[in-house]
Image: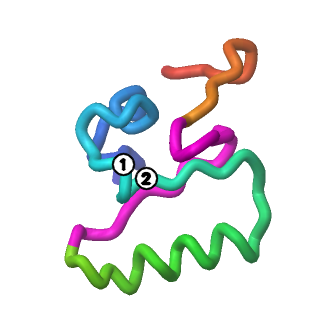
Amino acid sequence: MTPKLPINIDDLLRRRTVESERIEYKEGWNPEVVLHTLCAFANDFHNLGGGYVVIGVAEHNGQPQFKQQNLLLV
């Protein structure tokens, strides 16, 4: 089995193919905060099909904040 995302990571980071309400950016690993987000996506009250949690990317007002030296897209 090949571990691949069903979406291009650059498109996900730049919000090109996924609505912004289905993407959460977390600057670091805080288990409690991340688990709350995962539970919210699992509940999926609006039937959007879940979402994506991107750990390692800060956000400001819902927009991802990229630090050039830390961002590596392969």
Residue 61 belongs to magenta span: yes
Q: Which mark is residue 20?
A: 1
29 left or right, relative to 21: right
Q: Which mark is residue 53?
A: none
Where residue 60 sits, quadrant-wise, is top right
The structure residue drawn at horizontal position 76% and vertical position 57%, both measured from the top left corner, is 29
Q: What is the quadrant of the N terminus in the image? A: bottom left
Tag 1 and tag 2, C-beta contact below 8 Å: yes
Q: CA distance from mark 1 to mark 2?
A: 5 Å
The structure residue drawn at horizontal position 40% and vertical position 80%, both measured from the top left corner, is 42
Q: Amino acid at mark 2?
A: Ile
Residue 55 belongs to magenta span: yes
The 10 Å Cα crowd at callout 1, few under 14, some 14 to 19, many 20 or more, is some
Instruction: Give the residues drawn in magenta, as a range.
Output: 48-63
Residue 28, position as x, y percentages in the image = 77, 50
The colour scheme applied to this rendered structure is rainbow
Tag 2 residue: 23
Residue 65, position as x, y percentages in the image = 62, 30
Could you say which is closer to the camera, residue 22 or residue 62?
A: 62
Looking at the image, the residue that sits furthest to the front is 61
The structure residue drawn at horizontal position 68% and vertical position 42%, both measured from the top left corner, is 56
Q: Nearer the viewer, mark 1 or mark 2?
A: 1
